[in-house]
Image (spheres, rainbow, N blue to C red):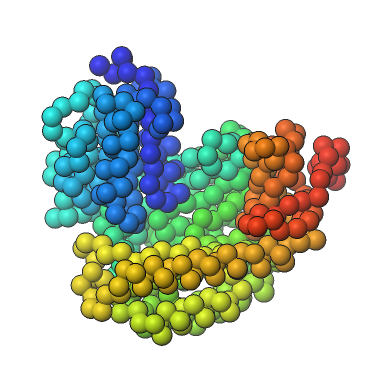
Amino acid sequence: MIETMSKVAFHTLGCKLNFSETSTIGQQFLKHGFSIVDEKEKADVFVINTCTVTENADRECRQIVRRALRNNPNSFIVVTGCYAQLRPDEMAKIDGVDAVLGSNEKFNLFSYLENFEKKELSCIYPPRRIYVSPTENLDSFNPSYSSDADSRTRAFFKIQDGCDYKCSFCTIPLARGKSRSASPEEVISEFKQLLKAGYKEIILTGVNVGDYGSTLFRDHEYNLYSLLKMMLKVDGDYRIRISSIEPNLLTDEILDLTANDERMCNHFHIPLQSGSKDILKFMQRRYKVEDYEKLIYKANNRITDLGIGVDVIVGFPGEMEENFLETYNFLKDLPISYLHVFTYSERPETKAIEMANAVDPIERKRRSNMLRILSEKKKHEFYQKMVGKELTILFEHEDRNGMMKGFSSNYVRVKHSFDQELINKFVKVKIKEVDENICTTENISINELINIQAG
């Protein structure tokens, strides 16, 4: 049956790590003679990679399945990922779903699915994988990477998986198991292949990237800092970005390395979750508000034009108005660049779901909107500080109405008149002005680019 099928489409929910892993799943299909098509096209197989963080994951998955079956009623629907790991029975009950695979099984999909014929009932692989043993067989590591959209400029490279932290709101440790890492040798080998393939920005991803090496290499001094030093010994025209790092794991060594090597992006995404000491304690985070504040100022003092993104959750159980205002005012006064705002939603098998004083959903939305507006102000202020400065931009290939876009090292979004010669090159430009949520640059010709590179 496989021989007669040729097209597979994917829909990925959640974080950059999920996108990286979807790319690895796609490689399996390519090796078996499939071509990968856009999810809007007709496909013989449709794979949905789910996320446990996504709100209303069950409803969202149903909508995606219905949409896929409208395009092709005979598509074989596979659901996998974190939500499928935690709630396989719920996923299997969705009309049209043919197979549900756990977190490990998705990396060996063709061992479980020998043909893709639709049947009346869906199958769960492994059978009855439910919360009774949520971390069963979740100790292996599967390196993966994906490109940013369909470009060959930025690659999301997974070097770590799982998490040993016990945050009271989070189901990721249940869905992905204990913290584990790729070996340094694996990372360096894959890193070199990514550079050889033409990628210029490598974004290190994982569930808890800063925890790299902490469990797998207890007898050795491997950690994220030592890995970064090894990577930076590799010759090439590239830069390295850390996707996200916990504040307690962002060490002075990493700060100094970032300050002293321009191949390290001067940008960090550092989760906070709450600026209220009481709520932070209920969340079971591994730092205090004052520790976070000291880190932000220290990082800004050491690294020029540092961009800092922050994760924050609003509406956590017990978050009174004064607690929320503590968070709001804390973030308002902090020298950061932007926020990723998450509205708290109840997750089964977490401590938080049993906590008293739930916040009304309407109030959660109001607080979320306040922080999103604050985020826009923060970003605009940060972008304004870049006006008149020279930033190094990695331009992408896409031509949108005669314009092309790219990111600076400190994660400033920039647009420039389209020029084929600038694609996937590091280009120094002077920031001219801020146009809504993007910076514009002074024009640069290809001759100027050649002179810059020669210099």
Task: Examine the image and state in which quarter residue 398 appears.
Answer: top right
Residue at x 59%, y 36% (from the top left corner)? 152
Residue 96 percent location from the top left of the image: 21, 34
| Residue 265 point in image, percent of width and height | 63, 56
Which residue is found at the position 30% from the left and 79% from the top?
318
Q: Position of residue 373 (x, y in %)?
A: 53, 67
- In the rendered structure, the answer to whether residue 220 lies left or right of residue 354 reads right
Which sits in the foreground, 59 or 192?
A: 59
Q: Quadrant of the N terminus?
A: top left
Residue at left 39%, top 82%? 321
Residue 429: in sight, yes or no? yes
Can residue 99 be seen here? The reply is no
Closer to the camera in the image, 285 or 178: 285
Query: Residue 431 falls in which quadrant of the image?
Result: bottom right
Picture layout, residue 29 above or below residue 341: above
Query: Where does residue 39 sit, x and y in percent of width and height?
Result: 40, 32
Query: What count of labels does the image hold?
Result: 0
User: In this view, which residue lies farthest toward the top?
Assistant: 4
Point 61% across, 46% down: residue: 201
